[in-house]
Image: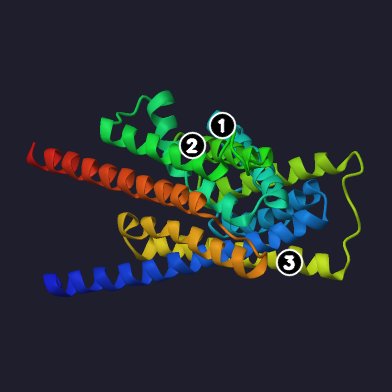
Amino acid sequence: MARPPLAATDAAGAAGNLRGIALMLAAMALFAVEDMFLKWAATDLPVGMVIFVAGAVGAPVFALMARLEGRPVLSRAALHPAVIARNAGEMVATIAYISALAVVDLSTVSAVLQATPLAVTLGAALFLREKVGWRRWSAIAVGFAGVLLVIRPGMDGFRPEALWVLISVVGLALRDLSSRAIPASCSTAQVSCWGLMSVALLGAVMMIPGGAVRPDTAQIATLFGAVLFGTAGYWAITAATRMGEVAVVSPFRYARLIFSMLIGILVFNERPDALMLVGAALVIASGLYAFARERARKRALSMQGASG
């Protein structure tokens, strides 16, 4: 069979990358809208109840996806130490993130959250013994300096509640690092289902001591909006990484901060000051630089392997 011309292959790859970028941008916009609904819900409803709904509604969706793949949800693989560690990170990240959304500006929450890739790189270097050069160490230091500018501890305007976001970043880093050690035989749908089941369990436990109320129509609509936009965002980000090259589409994750800031200004009347904007810019710039260095390192290793 004749191979397609190289130009046609390149054109198809470019078209796939453009679609992937568009879907990634759509996913970040959808997640920002989901955060808006979660902030409304967490302000009016107990945090445990919001967490329970997020897990209880999302888990069946991924359970169905796993069944369509022919994979069981109830499996011994769910007890693998890496899966348990990932679920623990998911629970810590969820409770901290929703707690932060309830009391902290959406712009601040989103800005600090952008440090998650840097935290993952830091964790991989400290606990997985991955090699990190001085350039990426510098990027990590600059990124966390940007985080300090956003939350400004010890300065006027510091809110201790903003530390919830840092706890969420730690939980997300644990989740992502643990995911690397999960057996390849476990599908994404299975792993996602187990994570959301653990989140639902956490929410249920938090509701035991009276942490539940009967939501009114507006609150039900708010919870439904969070689930709807969150599910759509997950679909869009999954499609983005399948259509486009991960190295091309991943940097556009930072667009979430722009969408979140716009929602914060237009919906919640937030007014990010110059210090916060500088801090957010440092976080994003350092994350993009670290990502570019990692991409260059992998390309160099690939070329060495090909020449060897």
Residue matched to label 2: 182
Residue in view at x 69 percent, y 42 percent: 95
Residue 10, compared with residue 123, is above or below; it is: below
Residue matched to label 1: 80
Asked which quadrant contains residue 125, the reply is top left
Q: Is residue 14 visible?
A: yes
Residue matched to label 3: 224
Q: Mark 1 or mark 2, which has the lower sequence index?
A: 1
Q: Quadrant of the N terminus?
A: bottom left
Q: Amino acid at mark 1?
A: His
Q: Mark 1 or mark 3, which has the lower sequence index?
A: 1
Residue 237, compared with residue 266, is above or below; it is: above
Q: Amino acid at mark 2?
A: Ile
Badges 1 and 2: C-beta atoms under 8 Å apart?
yes
Q: Nearer the viewer, residue 146 or 214?
A: 146
Instruction: Please tell me the numbered disc located at residue 89.
Output: none
Q: Residues within 10 Å of mark 1 (few under 14, many from 20)?
A: some
Q: Nearer the viewer, mark 3 or mark 2?
A: 3
